[in-house]
Amino acid sequence: MTDFVETIMNPQFIATALAAVCVFATVLTVALPMLQRDQMNRRMREMAIERSKMRSARIAEMASKERQQGTSRLRSTPKGFMQQVVDQLKLRERFDNEELRENLKRAGLRGQANIVAFMFFRVAAPIIIFFLALFYLFVLYDSGYPASVNLLIALGAGFLGFYVPNMFISNRVQKRQMSIKQAWPDALDMLLICVQSGMSVEAGFAKVGKEVANQSLELAEEMALTTAELSYLQDRRQAYDNLAKRTGLPGVKAVTTALVQAERYGTPVGQALRTMAKENREIRQSEAERKAAALPPKLTVPMIVFFLPVLFIVILGPAIINYMSMKN
C-alpha cells in the first residue's frame, strides 16, 4: 500500500499522467470534428425526415382532438349539470368579468363551456376537498388529534380548495406562455422569410403555423387562429391585438404593434419583421446570459457540500496514510 501511494505521489508519475491526458484531449479535439463532418449530411437528412414525420403526426393529433370535441373549443357548449348549478347560484354575476375571460384565453380555454366549468369548480372544489380531507382524517389516517382539531384541518383544506381553480389556470398560463416564448423567435424568423419571398402576411402566418407545430403546439394554434381572424375580420389590427392579448407576452405584443404600424403608415412589413426578429434574438441571448450568470450562486452550496469534502480527502488522504504507516 505504501509503495502504491509513493508511486502515485511521485512528481515524475504525475507529470507523465498529465502529459498523457493532455495528448489524449488534443487528439480527441482534433479528430472529433473530422468524424462528425463525415456524418453531418446523413444526420441532417435523418433529422429532416424525422421532423417531417413528427410535424405530420402533431397536425393529425390536433385534427383528431378537434373532431373528438365536436366542432371546436371555440364553439363548445357547457354541460347541463354545471350550467344548472351556475345559473341557480347566479355565479356569473359574481365571477364573470373581462379579466377572467382573458386569463382563460391565455390558458387556451375558450368558449362558454370553459367559463361555466371554471365557475362551477370555484364553488365545488372547496366542498370536494373538505369532504376528502374529512374522509382521510377520520377513516384512512389516525392522526391522534381530537375530532375538533381534525375538523379545523379539514376546514382549512376546504378554504385552500377555493384557490385551486385559480392556481390551475395560472399554472396552465405559465406553461403555455413558456412554450410560446421559446418557439416565438424561430417562428418570427420563418415569418420574415415567408414575407421576403413574396407571400402575404396571412399566408405567412398559415405557413409558419404548420411548420412550428412540431416545436410548439400552442403557438401553432395561435397562428392558425390569427390567420382565420385576418381572413374574416374587417379591421386587421383587431386580429393582431387579439393575438397579443391571448398570449400575454411582451415580445408578441411588440411584433403585433410593429405590424399594425406598418399597415397604418405603409412601411414595409419585412423591415419591421427584420427589426423585431433581431430584437427577439437579442432578448433571448440576454436571458440565456442572465441564467448563466445566476448559476454560480446556485452551485455554491452543492460545491461546498459535495465537492470540498472529496477534495480534502484526495489532498489529505495520502498524507494521513503516510503518517499512519510511519507510526506503525
Image (cartoon, rainbow, N blue to C red):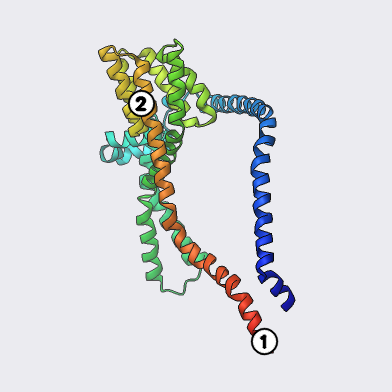
The crowd level at tag 2 (other Cα within 10 Å; few <14, some 14-19, many 20+) is many
Q: Quadrant of residue 316?
A: bottom right
Which residue was labeled with disc 1?
326
Instruction: Estimate the x, y position of residue 322 in percent, counting from the top left.
Output: 65, 81
**Does any portion of residue 195 appear in the rendered image?**
yes
Mark 2 against mark 1, which lies toward the viewer? 1
**Residue sitting at the far top:** 198
Furthest-front residue in view? 12
Q: Amino acid at mark 1?
A: Met
Question: What residue is at 73 percent from the left and 73 percent from the top?
Answer: 4
| Contact between labelled residues 1 and 2, with CB atoms less than 8 Å apart | no
Residue that badge 2 annotates: 276
Quarter of the N terminus within the rendering: bottom right
Q: Nearer the viewer, residue 28 or 116?
A: 28
Q: Is residue 94 left or right of residue 151?
A: left
Secondary structure found at label 1: helix
- Along the line of sight, which residue is nearer the eye, 296 or 276? 296
> In terms of image quadrants, where is residue 182?
top left
Badge 1 local density, few (<14 within 10 Å), some, or many (20+)? few
Residue 324 or residue 194, whichever sits in front:
324
Residue 279 picture location, percent across and down = 36, 30
